Structures are given as structure tokens and as C-alpha cells.
Image (tube, rainbow, N blue to C red):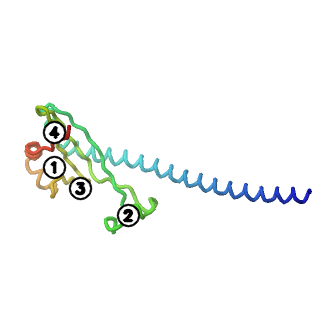
Amino acid sequence: MKEEQLDRLIQGSKRAKKVLEKRRLAQAEQQKYENRRQQNQRLKAEFGAQLLTLAEENGLLQAAERAALRLGGNLTSNMRFHVHQGMSTCCIDPSLIEPEIGELRPSFLALLITWQDADDTKEVEIRMDRRQWINLQNRFFSIPPFIWRRNLPKSLDDLIDDAIRQPHVMPA
């Protein structure tokens, strides 16, 4: 009887060790995930501040604010990011890659001007990347800084006005 109880205790101890080991591994994974999430939050704030400062320095933010004020609308900004996974980032399905492989990088700063026109809500999106290339309303080609800086601030105002003439109408 005592030997049977001793065997049960040994088997229970082995099961407990397995469960505790699985729990430790799960906690370690959770801690790694949490650390990576906090690091990404810090990087997002840092990249957002850098691009917003860059937009202020080159006059894009002020031009967008003037356009929003002129239309009686409002201006919102949003940062977009991507996970860079090396030279072949575009060729690999991101769901197949572990998140530890990639590095968080800024894609662009999006300035969104929205306004009311009769019953429609219209919007224009202006994007600026780290190289200061500007893309207005998701056009195929971006505009490099040496082109739009020619007649500052009039050139930015003209580019934004051109995009406003062909706004995207938001569904009601």
C-alpha cells in the first residue's frame, strides 16, 4: 500500500513538473511579446514625432491646415508603419514569418482633410514619407521634394487645391 502511494506521488510530481515547465514557457513567451509591444509603442511615438516635426518644418502641415480652414473642415493626422523583414519583404507572406524577424519602420504620415459639401462628406489624404516625398489622394506617383519645394508655400497650396478638386466622397 505504501509503495503504491509512493508511486502515485512520484507520478503526480512528474505531471506537476511538466505543467510548471509549460507554464514557465508560456510566461516567458508572454513576457517577450509584452516587451516587443512596448518597444513598438515607443518606436511608433518616436517615428510619429519625427515625421510630424518634418511636416511642420517643410510647411506641409501648415498648408494642410490652411486648406482645412478654407473648406470649413478639419485636419487629422495618422502614422502608418510596416514591419521590414529584409530585402525580400514584399515577396514573403507576413503570416509565415515570426514577428521577431522584422523591424518596425515608419511608412508615411497621413494628413486627412475632411469637410461637408451639401449632404456629402468629402476627404482628401496627403501622405509624406521619411524622404519627404508627397503623395496626394493615393495617386500612382509621389512628388519628390525638389519639385514641390520650388515655390513654397504656393506650390504646396496649389497641389492640395488640385487634390481637393477631385476629393473622395465618403459613404454615408
The image quarter in which residue 140 lies: bottom left
Question: Of marks 1 and 3, which one's residue comes earlier in the chain?
Answer: 3
Q: Give the left or right position of residue 8, taking residue 118 as reference.
A: right
The residue that mark 2 highlights is 85
Look at the numbered discs 4 and 2 and tell me whether their residues touch, using CB distance below 8 Å: no
The secondary element bearing badge 1 is classed as strand
Residue in the image at 45% along x and 62% along y = 98
Q: Nearer the viewer, mark 1 or mark 3?
A: 1
The secondary element bearing badge 3 is classed as loop
Instruction: Pinpoint residue 35: horizontal percent, then vertical percent.
Output: 50, 50
Residue in the image at 69% along x and 58% along y = 18
The secondary element bearing badge 4 is classed as strand
Question: Of marks 2 and 1, which one's residue comes earlier in the chain?
Answer: 2
Callout 1, which amino acid? Leu
The residue that mark 4 highlights is 122
Residue in the image at 42% along x and 46% along y = 41
The residue that mark 1 highlights is 136
The secondary element bearing badge 2 is classed as loop
Look at the numbered discs 1 and 3 and tell me whether their residues touch, using CB distance below 8 Å: no
In three-dimensional space, the C-alpha distance between marks 2 and 1, rounded to whole angstroms, equals 27 Å
In three-dimensional space, the C-alpha distance between marks 4 and 3, rounded to whole angstroms, equals 28 Å
Question: Of marks 3 and 2, which one's residue comes earlier in the chain?
Answer: 2
The image quarter in which residue 78 lies: top left
Instruction: Pinpoint residue 115: horizontal percent, then vertical percent.
Output: 16, 35
Q: Using a 10 Å C-alpha cutoff, classify the residue at mark 3 as few (fewer than 14 neighbours), some (14 to 19) or many (20 or more).
A: few
In three-dimensional space, the C-alpha distance between marks 1 and 4, rounded to whole angstroms, equals 14 Å
Q: Nearer the viewer, mark 4 or mark 2?
A: 4
Q: Using a 10 Å C-alpha cutoff, classify the residue at mark 4 as few (fewer than 14 neighbours), some (14 to 19) or many (20 or more).
A: some
Q: Nearer the viewer, mark 1 or mark 4?
A: 4
Question: Of marks 4 and 2, which one's residue comes earlier in the chain?
Answer: 2
Callout 2, which amino acid? Gln
Q: Nearer the viewer, residue 51 or 167?
A: 167
